[in-house]
Amino acid sequence: MRVGIIGGTFDPPHNGHFYMADKLRMLYKLDKVIFIPAGVPPHKRNRITRGIHRYNMLRLAIGPRPYLIASDIELKKPSMSFTFDTLELLKKRFSPKTELFFIVGADSILEIKTWKNYQKLLKFYRFIVVMRPGYDLGKLDRNIAKKISVAKIKGLAISSTDLRLRVREKIPITYFVPQEVEKYIYKHKLYKQEVVS
Ligand code: ATP
Ligand code: MG
C-alpha cells in the first residue's frame, strides 16, 4: 500500500490542500491520503483555532471519499507533536510493506532544518514537495533537494492565513474552501477576532 500524509494546522483546511491531495494521489498512485491536523505546533502556540473545529472542517470537506482520511492522532496528544514522532507512530500501525509519502508545500520544506530529526525524516520517508506561489525551491539546500521529489503540479494560490484575514474583513471565501467548510466557519463564528501571536 502507498499512503500519503499531509500535516499542518488546517486553520482552516482549503482547496489548496484538497487539490494537492487529489492530484498527488493520482500522480503517485497513492491508495490513501491522511490529513493530520497539528495539536499545538511549536511555532503557532496561542494562536490557532481549537483542534476540534479544525478536525470537524477536515472531515466535512472530505465527506464520503474513502481514500481521504482525517486523523486525530496529534490532536489527542496533550502536548505539541513533532512530525518525526507522529510518523514513527503511524509507521507501526501499517504493515512493513506500506510506503509512506510525506507531502509538504514549498514553504514547509524550506524550513525543514528547524524540524526535529529532520535528517532522519528525510532518510526514512519519501518526501513529495508541491510548489507554492511565493516560495522559491531554488533556495533549498542542495543536500535536501537531492532527497526529495518535487511534484509536477503547482500548488494553488490559497493560504489559510489569507482566508482568516478575508473572513475577518468580511470578504467572501467561496471557491477557496469547500462549501461545507465555508458554512462551518460562519456557523461557529470562526476567525472573527484578531488572534494573539
Ligand atoms: P497557514 O497560512 O496558516 O500557514 P497554510 O495554507 O500554509 O496555512 P497549512 O495547514 O499550514 O496551510 O499547510 C499544511 C501543509 O500543506 C503544509 O505542508 C503546506 O506547505 C501545504 N500547503 C498548504 N497550502 C498549500 C498550497 N496552496 N499549495 C501547496 N502546498 C500547500
Ligand atoms: Mg502553512
Image: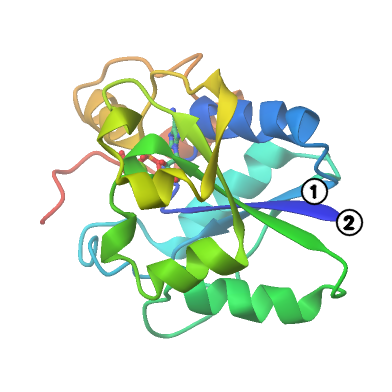
| Closer to us: 152 or 78 | 152
Q: Is residue 170 left or right of residue 87?
A: left
* Residue 14 visible in image: no
Q: Is residue 5 left or right of residue 46?
A: right
**Viewer can see residue 21:** yes
Q: Which mark is residue 1?
A: 2
The quadrant the N terminus occupies is: bottom right
Q: Horizontal and vertical percent for residue 91?
A: 71, 75
Q: Where is 152 relative to 33, above or below?
A: above
User: At numbered mark 1, what does the secondary structure look like: helix, strand or loop?
Assistant: strand
Near mark 1 (Cα within 10 A), the count class, few <14, some 14-19 or many ≥20, is some
At 51% from the left and 79% from the top, the residue drawn is 85
- In this rendering, the answer to whether 154 lies above or below 84 is above
Disc 1 within 8 angstroms of ligand 1 (CB): no
Report helix, strand or loop for mark 2. loop
Q: Amino acid at mark 1?
A: Lys
Residue corresponding to mark 1 = 32
The image quarter in which residue 190 lies: top left
Q: Residue at x 25, y 35 (%)?
A: 139
Q: Where's ligand 1: which quadrant? A: top left
Nearest the eye: 82 or 2? 2
Q: CA distance from mark 1 to mark 2?
A: 8 Å
Q: Hey, what amino acid is under mark 2? A: Met
Q: Residue 59 at x, y = what percent?
A: 66, 48
